[in-house]
Image (cartoon, helix red, strand yellow):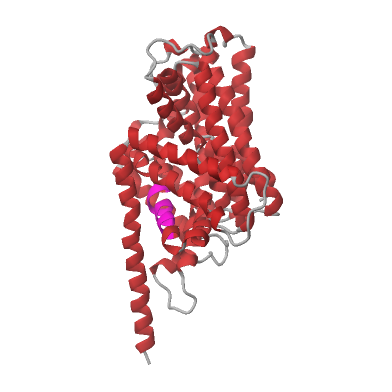
Amino acid sequence: MGVWAATAVVTGEAISLGIFLTPAGMARSLGSPALLAAVWCGMAVLTLAGALCFTELAVRNPHDGGEYVYLRRGFGRRVAFLYGWMAAVVMYPGIAAALCVGAVPYIQALVSIPSSPAAALPAVILLSLGALNYFGTRLSRSFMTTLNWLKVPVLAALVAWAFFSSHATLANLAPLTVRRAGSDPLIDAIAGAAISAFFCFGGWWEAGKIAGQVRNPARTLPIAFAGGVLVVTAIYLLVSFAFVAVVPMDRIQTNTAFVAQFGQALFGSAGGRVLSACVVLCVLGGLMVLSMAVPRVTYALARGEADTDAPPTALSAFGRLHPRYQTPANAVLLQTGMALLVLTLGAFDRILAFIIFSAVVFLALTVATLFRVITPVRRWWFPLAPIVFIAGSGLLSVMLLMHNLWPSLLGAAIVLLGLAARWLLVREKSLTQAVATESP
């Protein structure tokens, strides 16, 4: 991958369904355009600090696997295994399934599909993306890059049309600093908006997972991480203010109704179809990044846990590349299969709530590995950037516990089950070695 493809990974996962749904709730809760901009900018600073840290980690470890590789070198196999367990079995399959289900109503708005066949659409999307990544990185890379770079001009065109067509008016933004009637209490509003903003920015770190696929990592990855975050920040600020300039804050009721209001205001009766096309484009781009990046974590996990002198175990199958396509084919099958399994369980929102807290904790731990590297970091931003990111992640974790205590704790418990899974794998390896030793 070159600069364009690697940057598309950063922007593609961040710009997804969230940008169409969360700004409305954020604006209604905060009640002030100035506060809305402050939350977006605050999260952008936190994200940029994290991007600088992940750039250094990816350049030092230009291999597939991302956070798993960094955590393994910084904190050892056990912590890294827990992250790989969360990524492969819990977090990313849940996100992929939720995105597929969330895209279905928008696909139906574009194409008239009866309810029974529409119920199978999420599975069809997951299987199609799995096939793309199974049969070759080149094809999936080209498709992913095209989809994700289309998002930027499409969203920029929405903003431009909103202002140049006179549908947006700056009067709807005034007064900038005064909170509207009916806004939530300030602390609760800021906490809720910060969590929503994190959800929207989430995924910028995915480029590290495919560092082994990047040409000239020392040059490409810094541009991809920093450039991608800046592009996402600009898009989010512009789109959020365009939304509020078209639909005043006092008219915002629910997120889904807001999308319909915005589309109708800009494009009349065709507004629903136009906005639905934008949503489908953004969701498919994000799903492409997930389906490419996550199997690389499982692949790195399987290879990291393998012992070259020991017989293969159940985990070893995921550490092999396909002999013809040179893709982590078994890891792709696992990711697709787990996402299909989550589809049968339902309750996608609850599943996502369970894992977000653990995701924030692991991101902070990953950045903390910079303080444990053998060769000291000599960058202009060190140690300020990791301190800012770790402190910000700690504050965000507290906010998550305040708003979603039991889902957060349950998610952490599910992740900790990975310790039991690792114990079983280690025990299997020991038994296999013992049998091999006793065999004549």
| Residue at the spot 46% in from the left edge and 64% down from the top edge | 302
The extreme bottom residue here reads: 440
In this rendering, is residue 259 above or below 434? above
On-image quarter of the C terminus: bottom left
Residue 352 image offset from top left, x and y in percent? 37, 40
Report if residue 112 is visible in the image: no
- Please name whichever residue, 128 or 341, is drawn nearer the observer in this view of the structure: 341
Residue 359 image offset from top left, x and y in percent? 43, 45
| Residue at the spot 53% in from the left edge and 52% down from the top edge | 133
The extreme top residue here reads: 171
In this rendering, is residue 389 above or below 377? above
What predominant SS class does the magenta segment belong to?
Answer: helix
Left or right for 262, reference 158: left
Image quadrant assignment for residue 155: top right
- Please name whichever residue, 204 or 140, is drawn nearer the observer in this view of the structure: 204
Magenta highlight on residue 89: yes
- Please name whichever residue, 324 or 92, is drawn nearer the observer in this view of the structure: 92
Magenta highlight on residue 88: yes
In this rendering, is residue 235 above or below 223? above
Residue 381 image offset from top left, x and y in percent? 64, 44
Report if residue 293 is visible in the image: yes
Range drawn in magenta: 81-92
Residue 419 image offset from top left, x and y in percent? 34, 60
Image quadrant assignment for residue 159: top right
In this rendering, is residue 96 above or below 436? above
Left or right for 435, reference 53: left
